[in-house]
Amino acid sequence: MSSDEENIREVDQKAKMLAALAKKQKGHNAGKSTGLTGGSKVGAGQTAGAAPKMHRRKAGSA
């Protein structure tokens, strides 16, 4: 093989990798734009404020 053939193969491999990377990045961006538009994933029933924690002594004799 001559060095010209090797250079062509290297350029071809790089072009394939760059095309695959561009396709991968394009796919990820499209998927995120169709999903949730920010905000929390917690449902409305779970968003109410929790009751404050209260220490209680153990019942009965120590």
Image (cartoon, rainbow, N blue to C red):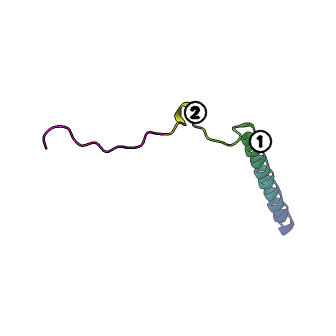
Q: Of the numbered discs in the image, which one, if any, rests on residue 43?
A: 2
Residue pictured at 55% horizontal, 37% vertical? 47
Q: Position of residue 23 (x, y in %)?
A: 78, 47
Q: Is residue 55 magenta?
A: yes
Residue pictured at 79% horizontal, 51% vertical? 22
Please state which of the two labelled residues, at mark 1 or mark 2, is closer to the viewer.
2
What segment carries the magenta color? 50-61
Residue farthest along the top direction in this orientation: 45
Question: Going from the N terminus, do you reach mark 1 or mark 2 first?
Answer: 1
Callout 2 amino acid: Gly
Front residue of this view, candidates 17 and 57: 57
- Assign the magenta stretch its main secondary structure: loop
**SS of the residue at dot 2?**
loop
**SS of the residue at dot 1?**
helix
Give the position of the N terminus as an image quadrant: bottom right
Q: Position of residue 54 (x, y in %)?
A: 35, 43
Which of the 4 quarters of the picture holds residue 34? Answer: top right
Give the class, few, some or many, for how many residues have Cα within 10 Å of label 2's Cα (few <14, many ≥20).
Answer: few
Give the position of the C terminus as an image quadrant: top left
Q: Is residue 38 magenta?
A: no
| Residue assigned mark 1 | 30
Residue farthest along the bottom direction in this orientation: 3
Q: Is residue 30 above or below residue 2?
A: above
Front residue of this view, candidates 38 and 24: 38
Q: Of the numbered discs in the image, which one, if any, rests on residue 13?
A: none
Callout 1 amino acid: Ala
Which of the 4 quarters of the picture holds residue 38? Answer: top right
Residue pictured at 77% horizontal, 54% vertical? 17
> What is the tally of numbered marks visible in this picture?
2
Q: Position of residue 21 (x, y in %)?
A: 76, 52
Q: Position of residue 52 (x, y in %)?
A: 42, 43
